[in-house]
Structure formats: C-alpha cells, structure tokens
Image: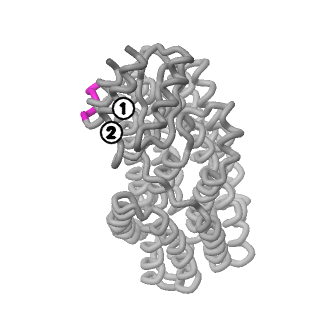
Amino acid sequence: MQLQVAMKLEHDNMSAFEARAAFSLASIYAFRMLGLFMILPVFALYAHDLTGATPVLIGLALGVYGLTQAIFQIPFGMSSDKFGRKRIITIGLLLFAIGSVIAASSHSITGVIIGRALQGAGAVGSTLIALLADLTREEHRTKAMAVIGMVIGLSFSLAMVGGPILNNLFGVNGIFWLTAGLALVGILMLYIAVPAPEQAMFHRDAEVEPAQLGRILRQPELLRLDVGIFALHGILTASFVVIPVALKDMAGMAESTQWAFYLPIFALAFFSMVPFIIIAEKKYKMKPVFLGAIATLAVAQLGLSLLHNSVWGIGVCLYIFMTAFTLLEASLPSLIAKIAPAGSKGTAMGVYSCSQFFGIFIGGTVGGWLYGLHHVVGVFLFCASLALVWLCLASTMKKPKQVTTYMIKLGQITQEQASQLNQHLMQLAGIHEALIQSDDGIVYLKVDKRVLDKDNLLELVNRYTA
C-alpha cells in the first residue's frame, strides 16, 4: 500500500538516487547564486570607473538581473513541461554565461547592464526545482528542497566574503569571467551528475499552475508575504549600492581589506539567528519573532544612516541587519508553505520568487537614484522607511497555523472515491486542509502533527483505496 510506505518513510533518509539528484542540482543552483551575489559587495566601487557611469545606472546594473529573472522565471518553468527540463536548464545557463562574458568584456556601464540583464534572463531556478520534483518521491521532496535552500544560504554567505577576495586577486572583470565558467561547469554537471528522470510530470507542490494564479493573488495573507520578500531584497540591494562606498570613502577602510570585515559579520549573523528560528518554530512564536526581525531591519538601517562614518558603527549595524535578514530569509518560505492552500504551494512560491526578484530590481534602481540625490543617508533612510511600511502591513497578519504539508501517493482513484475520502479526511483531528487530485492520485494535506493520529489516517485511506 503506497500510503503505508509513505508514512513509514517520513523519517527515513532519502535514497542514494534522490540524494545524488538533490546535491547535484543544489550545486548547479549554487554556481548561479555565487556568480550573481559575488559582485554585490564590490560592484559599486568598480562601476564608478566605467564609461557613462552615474549613480542611477550603477544601481540599475546591480539590480537589473532581478527584473529579467522575475519576467522569465515562470515562463521557463512552464516551458520545461513541454520541451524538457534539461534542455531548458541548458538554455538558461548558456544565457547566464553569455551575459557574464558581455559584462566581463564591457568597459561601459551600458554593456554591464546588458550583460546583467542577460544573466537574469537565464532564469532556471523554477526549472531546477521542477526537475528535483521529477527525481524525488513525495515523502522526501521537502527534504530535497531543504538541501537547495541550505545551499542557497551558504552560497550567499560565501559570495559576500569571497567577492571582495576575488576582487583583490582578479578584479570584478575576473569575477564575471569566473561566473561564466561556473555556468558552463553547471551544464557539464547537468548531464554528468544529475540523473535523468523516468518521466517529466507536473507537480503542484513545486511548479506554477496558471489556473491557480488568480486564487493565489487574491489571498491577503500570501500577498503580505510577497510584499515582505520584495521589501527584504529591495532593502538588501539598495544597502549594498552604498555600504562599500561608505566603508571606503567615509570610514576609511581599504577596498582590499573589506573581505575581513564581512567574514565575521556574516558568520556571527548566521549563528545569531538560529535561536530565534527555534523559538519561532518550536515555541510557536512565529508572529512576534517575525515582527521583531522586521523592526530590527528598520533600526539597523536608521543606525547606518547615523553611523556610516565609522567602521565600528557600520560593523555593528550591518551585523544587526544581517541577523534579521537571515532570519527573515529563512522564515518567509516557511510561512508561504504554512499559509498556501493545499496543493497550491508551487504556484504560491512562484509568485513569491517573482516578488523577490522584482524587489532586487527596484532596490538597486531606487538605491542608485537616491544615492545620486541624497548620498548614502538618503539610501539608508529609504531602506528604513521601506522596513517600517512592511512592519505596518505584517502587523495585521493572522497568527500562522502550526501545520505541516503531507503529500501521499495513492495511485489510481476515481473522482467519486476522491470526493468521499476528502469528506472523511476533514473529519479527522489534526487535518486542517485536504485536496485529492484523482488525475495524479496524490493527496495534499495540511496537518497539525501534534494531534494527528496517523493510524486513523492510514486506516481511512486504505479503506478507500483497497
């Protein structure tokens, strides 16, 4: 019985095949993220020497990849259902590599903007997730996606420290060339290390379903989270339009030593946010921890507006900011999974990702524009204001339910059986939502594991599929 297997394996390890798929796809994801983020802490200083550079164009060059990423993310994922996952990923990585080469070869800000836009156009993140779903069983998919999530977080931290180091060795041009090389290595890994799926299927938990978009966009609780990730990455990108400049020109820190400044800050920020994650998830204090982190963002940005002439001032405020940022970056996807209707997580995450990338674009562009008008203080005050607006919106959110998503593969089931099973499932204690798709034979459940009786659940489903 498939349910019996699914329930038994809930706490088991992934198979070697699934682990190989998860780690190889996570590596490809990491190659892209490293290339995109390594220039964040160094680009503002480098770009001033490019022909035609202005503050607003520097900000645009930093953030424009977010615009093209937001535009192409969902179409790439949908195209992979028709034309094949690996083919679409290859096209995306080639676009990313071409954009990197253009940026590396350019001596003008316009050329770098074109290159960065092409980098973003290779938006294969959703396709990588869809391929991962093809290669993993329902009961292990959350673990596999968690692997990618951890790799993304690690890549961000490594990029923020590694970018300044590589800039000292090879310059920003060298970072762009390295980025192009990593994209090509990613293509090799795609065909050498990533297993081939038996069949590409549509997965509601991992892909965008166009018919669900209207429903998702009408959910106020999800829209608050979309605004949140937009604001979070807008603040991050705008901040790094000016933080490297403030460190060098106002605090007197040499460009060559900035990597040593970032390293302890990012390491401490990561470990500092862990207790708050535990309190939020294990002590069921998600909303107060979440609101506290947003308020901390605003405080850190106000601090930067006042203390940007001091290395210690920038260091303390950046540590506070990155602790809150890392906490929110980890919490937001968890909230999406809790709040999204059963069977709609893929669509909700697609809208969420587009909001994130659009925030990067707006943050870079507006940050550059404000830097030209009001220097660094104007940018930090804008970021603080954006955080306060987000705090006001987030304060009206409902307390998130402590639910977990279960996906159970049933096999063939008639529409009548699905309807009857759905009614009986909703009568079981601990089940908040249930969706049964008779076409693919999968049950999507939102459950409270504290009160769910798994034996009753197994007995009920066995009765309807025997």
Q: What residue is pinned by disc 2?
A: 453
Q: Position of residue 273 (x, y in %)?
A: 37, 65
Whole-percent x and y of residue 293?
48, 69
- Is 132 on the left or on the right of 304, as rendered? left
Q: Residues within 10 Å of mark 2 (few under 14, many from 20)?
A: some
Res 84 → quadrant: top right
Q: Height in image: 80 above or below 319?
A: above
Q: In this rendering, does residue 93 appear at all? A: no
Closer to us: 78 or 108: 78
How many numbered badges does the structure rendering display?
Answer: 2
Residue type for callout 2 = Asp
Distance of label 2 from label 1 (alpha carbons): 6 Å
Image point (55%, 37%), residue name: 346
The answer to whether mark 2 and mark 1 are in CB contact below 8 A is yes
- Seen in the picture, residue 453 relative to 367 is either above or below; the reply is above
- Please provide the residue range marked out in magenta: 12-18
Q: Nearer the viewer, residue 378 or 47?
A: 378
Q: Is residue 304 left or right of residue 407?
A: right
Q: Which residue is mark 1?
A: 457
Q: Is residue 345 magenta?
A: no
Q: Quadrant of the N terminus?
A: top left
Q: Residue at x 41, y 23 (%)?
A: 409
Q: Nearer the viewer, residue 5 or 253?
A: 5
Taking the image as shown, residue 223 lies to the left or right of residue 421, namely right
